[in-house]
Image (cartoon, rainbow, N blue to C red):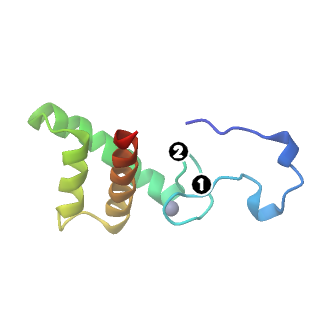
Amino acid sequence: MEIVFEPCLSEKRVEEKSGLKCKICSKEAVSNGYCMLHEKAHQNLTEKFETWKGALGISWKNYLNEIIKNPSTGVKAREVAEALLSIHNKTNLA
Ligand SMILES: [Zn+2]
């Protein structure tokens, strides 16, 4: 997802300069709407999904559920998986 620049908002206060905050922790987002830490976890999750999909034919939703259930999943990865799952569920309701 690319950053959309809105020149008319340039007078906003400094802490809102990017206008983008992490969907999870509200820190400044670097890409995809995640901060650096959550973006890293997000990348790991999507990369691992390719492997799982190839090996197990698992769906995105089931994969995210497995990640959330797995006790060895890191805190950041679980937070991202939960956020992605809720986005997925919302998207599929539309
Ligand atoms: Zn974050």
Residue at screen point 40% across, 48% down: 87
Q: For the residue labelled by badge 2, is the local secondary structure a helix, a strand or a loop?
A: loop
Residue 21 position in % (x across, y down): 61, 57
Above or below, 5 against 25 in this view is above
Residue 82 in view: yes
Residue 7 position in % (x across, y down): 85, 40
Q: What is the CA distance from the residue labelled 1 to the residue labelled 2?
A: 8 Å
Badge 1 amino acid: Ala
Q: Quadrant of the N terminus?
A: top right
The answer to whether the residue labelled 1 contacts the one labelled 2, judged by CB atoms less than 8 Å apart, is yes
Residue at screen point 30% across, 65% down: 74
Identify the residue under disc 2.
32
Residue 44 in view: no
Q: Which mark is residue 29?
A: 1
Residue farthest to the front? Answer: 94
Residue at screen point 17% across, 40% down: 52
Residue 28 position in % (x across, y down): 63, 59
Residue 42 position in % (x across, y down): 40, 50
